[in-house]
Image: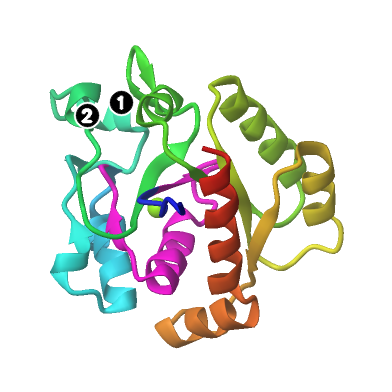
Amino acid sequence: MKVPIGHLIVCGTDTDVGKTIISAWLVQGLGAMYWKPVQSGLEAGGDRGRLSRLLDLPATRVLPEIYAFQQPVSPHWAAEQEQRCIDPDQLTLPKVKGPLIIETAGGLMVPLNRQWLQLDQLQRWNQPLILVARSGLGTINHTLLSIEALRKRNLNVLGVILNGTPHPDNPATIEEFTGVPVIAQLPILDELSREALARQWQLQELSLRFERLEDAWSESR
Ligand SMILES: [Mg+2]
């Protein structure tokens, strides 16, 4: 029997690689809900605010953060500046109907507190992952390092999504070295809008792609 993917975690090879825009692409394409449990940097409403406005999402499709800090710095330090500390026990996965896109903070080895990395939290959650990476120079190194770290924790990387001007060689090289498929590439859009994201989703036949990924993931369990 097919097991639908419930929680899908969007992590990144680095900070600012485009996790929020890729999350928006997935939320819209998969008709999913969105959750960013740890947010540091609250200008423009943080990633939840930006994504909600971009997709014009009703509040029912968006879950509130567990931790939200003012400063746009590493979560452990953003918390400390407010005399707070992130408690991993508070970061329990919510039970929701249908798919939930979970956006993580920063890269994999970003500290959530002085003893606990994002990667530790990913291991505790133990859910399928999408790794977002930049499309251009430097991405092979970052992506291979990230996949090695995820595999060391026995985590299931469904695929890589590259963000930025499509590169003639990087996708194939990443696939060859890791065996992880590059499932999509989001080019720089003339205008960032729901329509432009939907067009790319259709062009790249991502509904079909995710259906197949879900079948493969289901069989592997
Ligand atoms: Mg983000």
Coloured how? rainbow
The front one of 107 and 175 is: 175
In the rendered structure, the answer to whether residue 112 lies left or right of residue 216 reads left
Q: Residues within 10 Å of mark 1 (few under 14, many from 20)?
A: many
In the rendered structure, the answer to whether residue 99 lies left or right of residue 19 reads left
Q: Which residue in the protein does label 1 denote?
A: 76
- Residue drawn at (70%, 44%) of the image: 180
In the rendered structure, does residue 23 fall within the stretch colored magenta?
A: yes
Q: Which residues are magenta?
A: 8-37
Q: Which residue in the protein does label 2 denote?
A: 79
Considering the numbered disc 2 on the image, is that residue within a helix, a strand or a loop?
A: helix
Considering the numbered disc 1 on the image, is that residue within a helix, a strand or a loop?
A: helix
In the rendered structure, the answer to whether residue 100 lies left or right of residue 176 reads left
- Residue drawn at (46%, 69%) of the image: 25
Which residue ends up furthest to the top in the rendered image? 115
Q: Identify which amino acid the numbered label 2 is placed on.
A: Ala
Which residue ends up furthest to the front in the rendered image? 1
Proximity of marks 1 and 2: CB atoms separated by less than 8 Å:
yes
Q: How many marks?
A: 2
Residue 163 on image: x %, y %: 61, 61
Q: Residues within 10 Å of mark 2 (few under 14, many from 20)?
A: many
Residue 37 on image: x %, y %: 25, 43
Is 176 drawn above or below residue 121 in the view shown?
A: below
In the rendered structure, the answer to whether residue 99 lies left or right of residue 158 reads left
Q: Is residue 169 visible?
A: yes
Residue 130 on image: x %, y %: 53, 48
Is 181 drawn above or below residue 115 in the view shown?
A: below
In the rendered structure, does residue 164 fall within the stretch colored magenta?
A: no
Residue 110 on image: x %, y %: 44, 29
The front one of 14 and 204 is: 204
Q: Quadrant of residue 33?
A: bottom left
Q: Is residue 131 visible?
A: no
